[in-house]
Amino acid sequence: MTLPLTPSQTVGPYFAIGLSRRPENELVPPGSERAFTLAGRVLDGDGVGVPDAMVEIWQADPSGEYRPDFGWGRAGTDAEGRYSFVTTRPGSVEGQAPHIVMLAFMRGLLKPVLTRVYFPDEEANAADPVLSGLPEDVRPRLVAAVDGDTVRFDVRMQGEDETPFFTL
Amino acid sequence: MSVHSGRLAEIADEERTDPPYLYPDYRSTERRAPRSPLLIIPHTVSETTGPAFGESAVEEFDADLTRQHAGEPLGERIVVTGRVTDHGGRPVSNTLVEVWQANAAGRYAHQVDRHPAPLDPNFSGAGRCLTDDDGRYRFVTIKPGAYPWGNHPNAWRPQHIHFSLFGRAFTERLVTQMYFPGDPLLEFDPIFQSVRDAAAQKLLISSFDWETTTPDWCLGYRFDIVLGGRAATPLERR
């Protein structure tokens, strides 16, 4: 038996009443050991910040394990399209370089976009099975920038530097 | 398992019934839909795992949107229930189901909503629950009203309830909308119509249900949800 899957629909402009009732963007306490901020903007095709996007992340713990009780977070964007998380560096999982999986939802998006955030200072990136399978010009756009204490990753929906998105 | 790492996929994926990213009748897609072909990556443990939420995620009255305030909300009381399964019909148990909706007058309790319809001090319009061992969920709420939006002249959204589900893998994550049977606005709604396949459209429409309709109390609607595919290999999907 194969049942057809329920189709996706947009999250719309009012998701905050249902999905952002409580803050869920701190995976670890701010200021705790090895905590850092993952932040960026969600930008539309005009380069304008998307004020009604929802960003979700999923990552392994520092020892490289995916646990049901750790590693997920979500954040709505502010008026300038900014999101932020407080988290800790995931460990390496099954030969992959440390990375954070990211989904973004927004009004005007009928199904979510899926991408990955890699860290700029990781030698393991060179051997990562996902990165190394992608065209060379695509890879740098999956690597975050470091800006002081913040790891910065913008989600660009369109344009020359459109964020690489994956099939779901 | 076949791995198509690095190959480019067409944005339209035939195996799914999801709408396309770019659907010009829904104007907001024009500046937000990705334009480059999606990339196919191998599905690793990062894509086939996902978070789980325990009882602590759900509070008393989270599943009864009519009992979250001192008084009862105005409108037509309804029960919305259904079963969450995978594509094999197996229950997806203990998964978090979140809903949000407009009130009976078609107004969201959200600062961005400027529709000149009354807010209801007894209705927040948000709920959540976990599915049981058989994958069933159940909400008590009021039937949401239709409301106008700015997509095109005299545009109205059909009555709908937003649903968010997690499933077993992060790539199974589903955000969708449940509609009501016989709504005359469905034919004209570009968000509903963005699902092009008529059979797939029906999957988004709840059915009136005598089994959950409660005498002298409320009408019942049934909305089953099928998750998956995203985390399965192409071979399993067939």
Image (tube, coloured by chain):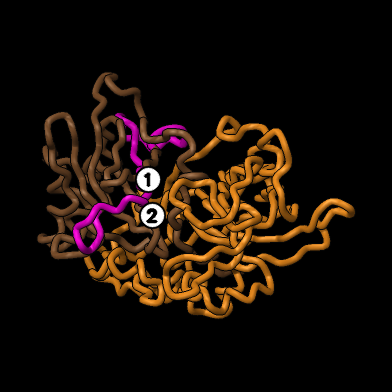
Chain colours: A brown, B orange
Q: Whole-percent x and y of residue B233?
A: 42, 62
Q: Compared with residue A44, is residue B120 higher up or lower down, i.e. above or below? A: above
Q: In which quarter of the image is residue B205?
A: bottom right
Taking the spot 19% from the left edge, 51% from the top edge, the residue there is A142
Taking the spot 45% from the left edge, 61% from the top edge, the residue there is A10
At numbered mark 1, what does the secondary structure look like: helix, strand or loop? strand
The crowding category of the residue bearing disc 2, from other C-alpha atoms within 10 Å (few below 14, some 14 to 19, many at least 20), is many
- Judge whether residue A159 is colored magenta: no
- Tell me the subunit letter for badge 1: A
Taking the spot 47% from the left edge, 34% from the top edge, the residue there is A22
Q: Whole-percent x and y of residue B144?
A: 63, 57
Q: Compared with residue B173, is residue A74 higher up or lower down, i.e. above or below? A: above
CB contact under 8 Å: marks 2 and 1: yes
- Residue tagged by mark 2? A105
The crowding category of the residue bearing disc 1, from other C-alpha atoms within 10 Å (few below 14, some 14 to 19, many at least 20), is many
- The N terminus of chain B: image quadrant: bottom left
Q: Which mark is residue A66?
A: none
Taking the spot 47% from the left edge, 65% from the top edge, the residue there is B149
Amino acid type of the residue that numbered disc 1 sits on in the rendered structure? Glu
Can residue A66 be seen here? yes
Relative to the observer, which residue lies in front, A23 or B57? A23
Can residue B90 be seen here? no
Q: Residue A56 carries which label?
A: 1
Q: Quadrant of residue B183?
A: bottom right
Q: In which quarter of the image is residue A162?
A: bottom left
What residue range appears in magenta?
A43-71
Mark 2 or mark 1: which comes first in sequence? Answer: 1
Q: In this view, does B29 lie to the left or right of B81?
A: left
Relative to the observer, which residue lies in front, A163 or A47? A47
At numbered mark 2, what does the secondary structure look like: helix, strand or loop? strand
Amino acid type of the residue that numbered disc 2 sits on in the rendered structure? Phe
Q: Whole-percent x and y of residue B99?
A: 57, 49
